[in-house]
Image (cartoon, grey):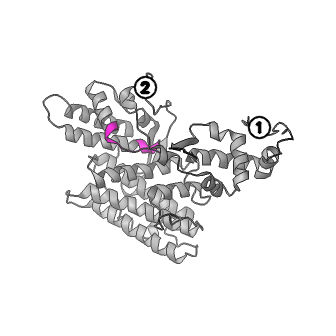
Amino acid sequence: MIVISRPTEGTVKLKQESRVLKQKALDSLVTSIEAFNAPREQGRVTRVLMNLQHAFEMLLKAALVQTGEKNIFDKQTGRSIGFDRCLGLAAANTIIKLADADADADAGTLRAIDAMRDDEQHWFNVVSEQVLYLHSRAGVTLFDDLLQSVFTENLATHLPYRVLPLSVDPPRDLALILDDEYSQIASLLQPGRRAGHEARARIRTLLALEAHVEPDTRVSNKDVLRVERGIRNGAPREQVFPRLDEVSTAIHGTGITLTVHFTKKQGAPVQFVADDSVPAAAVREVDLQRKYHRSPTALAEALGLTLPQSKALRDHLGIDADETCSHEFVFGKQRYWRYSDNAFRTMRDALEALGVHAIWDAHKPSGRSVARPPCPLPGCKAG
């Protein structure tokens, strides 16, 4: 990490656009760190989150350009893609590896930073000092990791050791931080306090932290009000925010040698629909068009397959029948199938394990008059 590795110059020959984007990322990271350490409190959280999120958007775009990604600009609008799309492409990139098993928690860290930034920019929230500190230090740690994995550089090449987010309050266990936040919210919602606006602002931050484990997190006002009602009714944190029990931190070192990684642990499954088995306060709205954002063509292209090959793989895995992977949108008389990132990951893993030729031989069209023999491959779900 930054403070325990010697400064190393990158051995990768940078593309011109990647060089510019990487420098913009470093500039925004330094600005975020300066804002964190600034003595002036006014606007501090806003400056930290906005610059930290921008730093990672620029770094991911620099990495995508450097590794040959062609879809940096939206085909319909002609504008450069946003943060969500950057994360999606980084998840599919075999060099950045943001979606690997060990890196999935890192993608969650970036989603949480972005979710907190979104509320801070477009409305308002209250981010506690401990939450801000953990995410700032985790951001610095992850920034260094990405620099090393893509550009063979480390952050110490660009920043002196002293230029890091520092706090006199040492990092605490995340569960304790969340419990403290929840207790403060409950106190603010006591009758007669007239502090509902601050309570809801703190609720927004806790909802944003669910992005660590739920890629489709969007903080909606309906979710805020559901959570508020649950807290007013005396529901415990584990019932109102069950997803947060899946998040923990791995902290090593102290002071300037501190490194922070958010990690994921297995938690109880949570349904995102309202039914009798789910407490109302734990229900979350999901933007289906955001969750299922890949067209059949885009899914095939991301996997490096032709449309018929992709269809064969979907048939083998039963993707079109899996609600976590696919959804049929109906607009009037038109129907469209769209696919989630989970579909991409499932298909990518199967492709690596089985190979495209074996899948194609087992599921290629055989004509109406010829009966298809049973699939010899393991795990086949084709009807």
On screen, residue 72 above or below 197: below
Is 353 left, or right, of 69 in this rendering?
A: right
Circle count: 2
Q: Is residue 215 magenta?
A: yes
Residue 170: tell me if it is visible.
no
| Secondary structure under the numbered disc 2 in the rendered image | loop
Residue at label 2? 278
Residue at 25 percent across and 35 percent down: it is 185
Q: Is residue 65 above or below residue 288?
A: below
**Residue 258 vs residue 37, the one in the foreground:** 37
Looking at the picture, how far across and down is residue 383, in whole percent? 73, 34
Secondary structure, mark 1, is loop
Q: In which quarter of the view is residue 198 placed?
A: top left
Q: Earlier in the sequence, mark 1 or mark 2?
A: 2
* Mark pair 1, 2: CA separation: 35 Å
Tag 1–tag 2 contact (CB < 8 Å) = no
Residue, far left? 192
What is the span of residues highlighted in magenta in the rendered image?
210-223
Which residue is identified by label 1?
A: 378
- Residue extending farthest top: 276
- Splitting the image into 4 quarters, where does residue 33 fall? bottom left
The percent position of residue 110, horizontal first and vertical second, equals: 44, 53
Q: Residue at x 50, y 37 (%)?
A: 265
